[in-house]
Image (cartoon, helix red, strand yellow):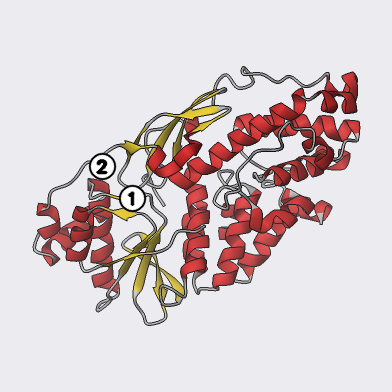
Amino acid sequence: MQRRELMIIAAATALFGGVAVAAALETPKPVGAQVFLGPTVLGPKYKVKPQVRSDGLMRIFDVETSYGEFTFAGVEFTKMRLRELDACAALDKMSQSDRFMNSLGRAALAPLQFGANLITNPVDAINRSMSGVANMFERGAAGLANTRADRDTLLDSLMGVSDTQRELAVELGVDPYTDFPPLAQRLKQMADAMAAGGLPVKAGLSFIPGGVGIAVSSVSSIEGAKDTLRSKSAAQLLVETRGNLQALDVPSESIDRLLENRNYTPADLLIMSRALNQLRAQNTVVFIDDAAGADTRDLAFYQRRVAELMTARSATLGNLVSFVRVGGHQLIVRRDGKSVAIYPLDDLAWTERVRRAFIATTAGLHGERPGDHPLFATTGAVTPMAAEEVRKLGWQVVKVKPLP
């Protein structure tokens, strides 16, 4: 533990008479996966294991798939991945359709190799037992301006493959720049074949027996930005992202760090920057500097959702106007001066990690913002013990409506 953190905790312990330190801790209990995912626990390409553990903040899902076993952190992140697996199943159906094969011909289909052995060694970064949240919290010109962060290759853009891949993904309701290996490889293979064979995307999708068959979910889809994602390259998305953040007076070096973080997809960056631009809070650099440090894919996705949630619930929470950093943690201040910690968590349990974070932040508030009466706003459940301990430290617990 860092010396500064020890000093903060010691100060907070003295401040609150040791009440937080003396309190017991709790171990989060496993819960059935169906509680969070409903009937989507089973799909044509996957099966979610029945029991779901928690790290005190996010639920951890173990999923058996046709491509190996994966571990996904967070309910919303898991829903996104399951939708991507459903998109894989839809693309498989398309590739196996007689009408699809007849339209493209043997030559166009020759490079395609589909099958359960497509991915034999899933990305190690996806397989972990704790969430990243717990471990925190125009084409040519655009391409030249963002060389290190650009996701489209020049050759693919010139040949139309990237355009086809984006359109195909948007029609399936998934991120065109997904980092999920099974879907990323399938999208590219199908887009290559369709572009080479001159087959329009909607015509190809019409060949899927029984239709696409993917339930719409705004959590895991890109519905709000689909027109932009369909029509613009990755580099163009990054140009818009940069412009949105510059309008909020975020320094160039902070923007660069964010854009170069490959844990974010260009779609994440676009959606997050649009949300922040709509919120228009002062000191947005505080949020961006935290977001730029996301070292896992699930944490990057989470940061995007935080931006969306703050914007969507600003009025409900009393109008959020300015970011601040207190006790090493990012907060946002509402118009009446109260600080708000807003987190789209699955559930909050009073673990050692959570206890330390609240003590450090509370000590920081008393030192830097005396007289503050902070709010802890979350979309998830809060255990009775956690709620009581948070209130003892002077926080008001507020339940906010999740994003749809």
Return the residue nearer the eye: 298 or 379: 379
Q: Residue at x 51, y 61 (%)?
A: 307
Residue 93 is tagged as none
Q: Secondary structure at mark 2?
A: loop
Q: How many marks?
A: 2
Residue 394: x %, y % from top left:
21, 69
Residue 212: x %, y % from top left:
69, 38
Residue type, mark 2 in image: Pro
Residue 347 is tagged as 1
Return the residue nearer the eye: 394 or 383: 383
Q: Residue at x 26, y 42 (%)?
A: 28
Residue 89: x %, y % from top left:
65, 30
Residue 250 is at least partly visible in this image:
no
Q: Residues within 10 Å of mark 1 (few under 14, many from 20)?
A: some
Q: Secondary structure at mark 1?
A: strand
Q: In this picture, is 310 found above or below 21?
A: below
Residue 28 is tagged as 2
Is mark 2 in CB contact (under 8 Å) with mark 1? yes
Residue 181 is at least partly visible in this image:
yes
Residue type, mark 1 in image: Asp
